[in-house]
Image (tube, rainbow, N blue to C red):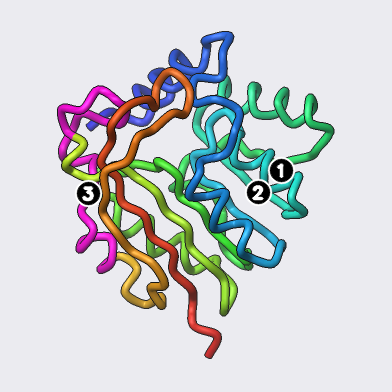
Amino acid sequence: MRTAQEAKQFWDDRYSSGNYIYGTQPNRFFKDKIDELEPGWLLLPAEGEGRNAIYAVREGWKVDAFDISEKGRKKALELAKRNHVTVNYYLSNFEDFDITNKQYDAVALIYTHLHKSKRRETHRKLITGLKPGGHLILEAFSKEQLGNDSGGPQDIDMLYNLDELLEDFDNLQIKHAGSIEIELKEGNHHEGTANVIRILAMKSKG
């Protein structure tokens, strides 16, 4: 597992490219699901270069986003400026981002890979920020992705298992959950056959 400084350096180096390495269009599953929801406040952790945040704002959402990478944040804000929208984009890690008293209508975790030692605690912390009736949207690489060249960590402890994720979110109502093989085409770093997990869940209104 990388140290916090090593992780920051890794992502700053990756986002130093002049191109948007995951493209500028939103993730397909994210787009499909966010389009089904009534716009409100959205949280996008580890948002990188901003493709999902910019799409959501253009569709009427108010967005808080954060990432550890200064380079990723800079490119996201440049993309927002080009699209004439505003995103509240913070430079932060999961531990330091203050979700206390935040009430989001949706939280989207799009290829947000956490080490198994931190995954469950972090996921449960994030959903405390969901309003009753708020939704979680998740797409991430499954453990079957190991060895594929279409993106994602090549560390089994950073890849996910559907049953483990369902335990992380066991206090939510699961509306969709599946582990499938897809063809990714999201910039140079997400391209080709990939094994992913997709989840849509809702926090109880009661």
- Count residues near mark 3 (Cα–Cα under 10 Å), then give few for <14, some for 14-19, many for 20+: few
Q: Residues within 10 Å of mark 1 (few under 14, many from 20)?
A: few
User: Across the whole image, how many numbered discs are drawn on residues?
Assistant: 3
Q: Earlier in the sequence, mark 3 or mark 2?
A: 2
Q: Closer to the N terminus: mark 3 or mark 1? A: 1
Instruction: Find disc 3 in the rendering and name its residue.
Output: 117
Picture coordinates of residue 197, whole percent (x, y): 31, 51
Residue placed most toward the observer, 118 or 61 = 61
Q: Quadrant of residue 33?
A: bottom right
Mark carried by residue 88: 1
Residue name at image x 43 percent, y 18 percent: 188
Measure the C-alpha gap from mark 2 to mark 1.
5 Å
Q: Quadrant of the rendered structure where residue 79 is?
A: top right
Q: Residue at (57%, 71%) from the top-left corner?
A: 134
Q: Nearer the viewer, mark 3 or mark 1?
A: 1
Residue lying at the far top in this picture: please name it: 18
- Distance between the Cα atoms at labels 3 and 2? 26 Å
Q: Amino acid at mark 3?
A: Ser
The boundaries of the magenta stretch are 146-167
> Residue 204: image x %, image y %?
49, 82
The disc at residue 64 is: 2
Q: Are marks 3 and 2 in contact (CB under 8 Å)?
A: no
Q: Is residue 118 left or right of residue 64?
A: left
Q: Residues within 10 Å of mark 2 (few under 14, many from 20)?
A: some
Q: Tell me which label, 2 or 1, sits earlier in the chain.
A: 2
147 within the magenta span: yes
Disc 2 secondary structure class: strand
Q: Secondary structure at mark 1?
A: strand
